[in-house]
Every structure is written in C-alpha cells, then in structure tokens.
Amino acid sequence: MWRSWMHGHLAQQTQQHHAAADGDRLAILEKPSGERYRTYLARIYGFEAPIERACIAAEDVPGGLLRTHLKSARLRTDLEALGFDEDTLPPLAPPRFAGAPEALAWMWVLHRNTLLHGLVYRYLRAKLPEPLEAAGSYLCAFEGRAGALMHELSASLERVARRASIAERISTAAKDAFRAQRQWYGSELPTTTIRRAA
C-alpha cells in the first residue's frame, strides 16, 4: 500500500503537539453530560468554522477536498439541535493563508482530530444516547473513512510540496495550527456559551 511521505513528515515534525491535541479531543469522555457535550461541540465549532472559511477563501485549494473534508456545517446543525446560540461564542480570528500549502496544512491538523471521532462517538452514544441521537452528525461524519480521507489529503499535500521550501512552509503552518488549537482549547469560554438558547 502506498504510504505518504508528506503525512509521515508532518506527523514527525508535529509530534510534540499530538498528546495535547488528543487530550483536548478526548476530554469529553471524562464525566460526560449533555451540557458538557454542548460546550465541547461549541468549542470545536468556534475554532474550526473560521479556519474552514479561510481554507475556502485561499487560492488553489482543490475544490474536491473542500467538498469532502469540511465539517462545520454538521457542527452548526448539531449545535442548533442542542439549542446553542452561535452568537454567544467569541469568534476565533481566522488565519490568513498565503496559499494552498498553509491552508492544506491547517486542514491536515483539523482532519487529524477526526481519527479519534469514532471512539468518542461510540463512547458517548452509550453514555448520552439522546443528545447523540439528536446531535451526533459531526462526530460520525467520517465513520469508517477518516483514514482514507487523510490519505487523500496527504496526497494533495505531496502534489503541492514540489520543493523543499514548500514542504517547510507546510510544516511551519501545521505547527502554527497545533499551537493555535491548544491556545483556543486552553482559553475560557463565556458562561453564556454553555446555556441553551432561550
């Protein structure tokens, strides 16, 4: 089976960030509740939606990847089902990408999170069946295909990384994405964020 050198390169270059990123994504497994699940999705949405909009606005990002890899619309639907008011969430200042190398690197970081979603969905479905029935579309969006989609994204990164300098731009952008994600998850959300919309 073909293995992506760019995926391996990014995984190695960003390894120091993986434990924190995985810990943030798996935190909901500790004492899950409907309220915590709503806050969990709100925090993800507040980070990922602005980045996805920046990816759409970036030049030369393959349209096929934008159709298959973006998930914030599912997040918004799930949050609406849980009574979340999007206006209560302070928006992340979206990054500005110099081009496809940076946008695809940030997409790679976001997509890496989805590799844990099957585990999270199955655990929460057993603990919180009603919220997950109403609002589980984001977590199960890539069930059974997250690895294949990562393969597709990595192949696009390889096509873009035609020179060592571009590969370095990609690595730098991925590290920036991990750092921004950690900062976002470490910040406090306003208390109104965890309340249901009136």
Image (tube, rainbow, N blue to C red):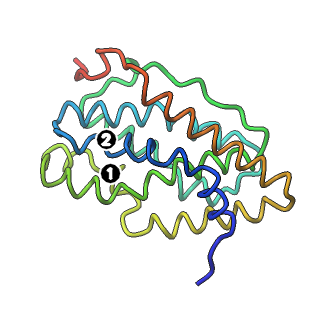
Q: Residue at x 23, y 32 (%)?
A: 36
- Which residue occupies the foreground of this view, 122 or 86? 122
Considering every residue shown, the one lying at the far bottom of the view is 1
Q: CA distance from mark 1 to mark 2?
A: 7 Å
Element type where label 2 sits in the image: helix
Other residues around mark 2 within 10 Å, as few (<14) / some (14–19) / many (≥20): many
Q: Which residue is mark 1?
A: 137
Quadrant of the drawing holding the C terminus: top left
Residue 64 in the image: state x and y as whole percent: 63, 60
Residue 121 in the image: state x and y as whole percent: 27, 54
Q: Residue at x 65, y 52 (%)?
A: 13
Element type where label 1 sits in the image: loop
The disc, 1 or 2, on the residue closer to the chain's N-terminal end is 2
Residue 4 in the image: state x and y as whole percent: 65, 71
- Disc 1 + disc 2, Cβ < 8 Å: yes
Residue 107 in the image: state x and y as whole percent: 59, 49
Left/right of residue 47 with respect to residue 123 in the rendered view: right
Q: Residue at x 29, y 30 (%)?
A: 39
- Which residue occupies the foreground of this view, 102 or 65? 102
Which three-letter amino acid code belongs to the residue tagged 2?
A: Asp
Other residues around mark 1 within 10 Å, as few (<14) / some (14–19) / many (≥20): some
Q: Which residue is mark 2?
A: 78
